[in-house]
């Protein structure tokens, strides 16, 4: 049986914002400065609560997942805490991932997985700071700190993580019975793909292990594991999943905002637009619908109003296949250019790097596309290099923000100190109404000239109009 947790990770580079060694020592957090376990829903960022914002809950083991202390239990390890086991199952059914950060040996995580019946997407077992463990989990799973919750029975551990990682929602075990009803833990829609998210991360671990031992190139590995990317016109049955993707994607979301189900339904039925789905599977498992886009076909130009992709598809040739298909299809219809209006925010740097790697250049700054191309030895990581495709988050809290300014290709990126929030405000709900070629605050238009050689569609991808 596949192990339900990963092994310990050696201490290494920790994301910016974590506490420097020695900054917080036991006893330095004054009593009463953080009310134990009461960092309540919405308290991290007033007025910023959005349904379903928590994508992963990171759990302590002792007196949290287990009804006791693992290393003090003797020959018979403690059983699962029944209340926490119920919460685990409920949240997993909503598509929320679970992970472990514990001062214990790896065997404790294996035991917790066994007695709770939960499949944990990642586990950090060791004796370092909990904030470091949480940061590494965020990097491994490619999840932003603001999409994490951390649950621990120890007030000091909660205070340390709160201090080091302010965006993380920090809770006590006692909070969790109520927390399942909070909007942060209540996505507006949960699709079959969402419910299988934990199992898909288990498939991902097996795929990564096989890739590390594979001796050939990334393309050879993708072929060897039977990668299949299927691009097709969307149907009404796809609307819930398309809406879920628009809500949950941020690294690969050009609009920087979600699109409601009724809006997707209207776009599918409109002759003025095209809505596409992208599905992915291989010998390790079927990921289902992992991406989509909304296109408009004007005189001489195709415009991609929304381009979105699940982070599970990163590094697996999917974004390259979709961009190649779009370019080839637009050229067949007589278009001279393909445009992708793109919000500029701190999270979608991987998408902008992928666009630059595919030959798109941003309007407004002729040098920007060249700068992005010059950085492509690293930039290909976000566009598809298998090592960074799954660990891109490790460098993005700092380095990719600078790379983002290069890849963004618009002077609007200069406003990105406040730009993440401004970009969201600029695009608005859905963010699909900007006229083709328009560049405004917090956004740029990436353009591909279709007059030259067209990209080849990878052999593992199929789409309308292709043999």
Image (tube, grey):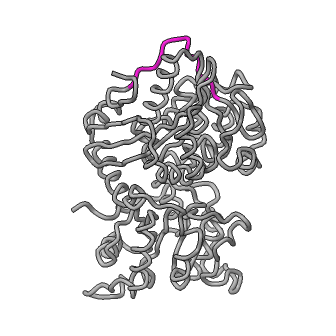
x%, y% of residue 177?
51, 83
Q: Is residue 9 left or right of residue 202?
A: right
Number of numbered markers: 0
Residue at screen point 73% across, 51% down: 421
Residue at screen point 54% across, 14% down: 334
Q: Is residue 370 left or right of residue 464?
A: right
Q: Residue at the top extreme?
A: 452
Position of the N terminus by quadrant: bottom left
Q: Residue at the left extreme?
A: 1
x%, y% of residue 355?
56, 30
Quarter of the view holding residue 219:
top left
Which segment did they paint magenta? 446-457
Quarter of the view holding residue 25:
bottom right
- Front-lying residue, 355 or 267: 267
As for residue 452 lying within the magenta part, the answer is yes
x%, y% of residue 234?
45, 40
As for residue 86 lying within the magenta part, the answer is no
Q: Is residue 250 left or right of residue 198?
A: right
Residue at screen point 50% across, 45% down: 392
Residue at screen point 64% across, 49% down: 257
- Front-lying residue, 395 or 386: 386
What's the magenta bit mostly, secondary-structure-wise?
A: loop
Position of the C terminus by quadrant: top left
Q: Is residue 200 above or below residue 174?
A: above
- Front-lying residue, 318 or 123: 318
x%, y% of residue 298?
62, 23
- Front-lying residue, 169 or 27: 169
């Amino acid at each position: 049986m596949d192990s339900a947790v990963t092994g310990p990770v050696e201490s290494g580079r920790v994301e910016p914002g974590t506490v420097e060694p020695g900054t917080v020592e036991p006893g330095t957090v004054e009593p009463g400065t953080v009310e134990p376990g009461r960092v309540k829903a919405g308290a991290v960022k007033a007025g910023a609560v959005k349904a379903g914002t928590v994508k992963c809950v990171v759990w302590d083991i002792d007196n949290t997942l287990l009804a006791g202390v693992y290393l003090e239990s003797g020959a018979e390890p403690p059983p699962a805490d029944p209340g926490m086991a119920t919460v685990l199952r409920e949240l997993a059914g909503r598509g929320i991932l679970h992970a472990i950060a514990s001062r214990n040996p790896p065997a404790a995580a294996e035991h917790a997985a066994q007695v709770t019946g939960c499949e944990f997407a990642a586990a950090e077992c060791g004796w370092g700071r909990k904030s470091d463990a949480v940061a590494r989990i965020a990097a491994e799973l490619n999840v932003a700190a603001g999409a994490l919750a951390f649950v621990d029975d120890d007030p000091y551990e909660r205070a340390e993580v709160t201090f080091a990682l302010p965006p993380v929602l920090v809770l006590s075990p006692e909070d969790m019975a109520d927390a399942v009803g909070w909007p942060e833990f209540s996505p507006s829609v949960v699709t079959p793909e969402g419910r299988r998210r934990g199992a898909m991360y288990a498939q991902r671990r097996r795929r990564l292990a096989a890739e590390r031992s594979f001796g050939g190139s990334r393309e050879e590995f993708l072929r060897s594991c039977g990668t299949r990317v299927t691009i097709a016109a969307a149907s009404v049955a796809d609307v819930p999943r398309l809406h879920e993707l628009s809500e949950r994607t941020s690294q690969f979301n050009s609009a920087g905002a979600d699109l409601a189900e009724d809006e997707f339904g209207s776009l599918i039925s409109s002759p003025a637009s095209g809505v596409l789905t992208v599905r992915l599977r291989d010998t390790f498992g079927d990921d289902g619908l992992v991406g989509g886009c909304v296109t408009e076909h004007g005189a001489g130009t195709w415009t991609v109003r929304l381009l979105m992709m699940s982070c599970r598809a990163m590094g697996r040739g999917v974004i390259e296949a979709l961009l190649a298909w779009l370019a080839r299809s637009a050229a067949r219809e007589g278009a001279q250019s393909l445009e992708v209006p793109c919000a500029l925010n701190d999270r979608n740097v991987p998408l902008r790097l992928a666009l630059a790697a595919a030959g798109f250049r941003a309007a407004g700054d002729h040098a920007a596309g060249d700068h992005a191309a010059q950085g492509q030895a690293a930039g290909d990581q976000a566009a598809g290099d298998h090592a960074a495709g799954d660990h891109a988050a490790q460098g993005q809290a700092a380095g990719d923000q600078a790379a983002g300014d290069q890849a963004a290709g618009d002077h609007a990126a200069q406003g990105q100190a406040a730009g993440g929030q401004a970009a969201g405000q600029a695009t608005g709900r859905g963010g699909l109404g900007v006229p083709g070629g328009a560049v405004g605050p917090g956004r740029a238009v990436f353009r591909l000239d279709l007059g030259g050689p067209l990209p080849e569609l990878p052999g593992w991808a199929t789409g309308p109009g292709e043999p």
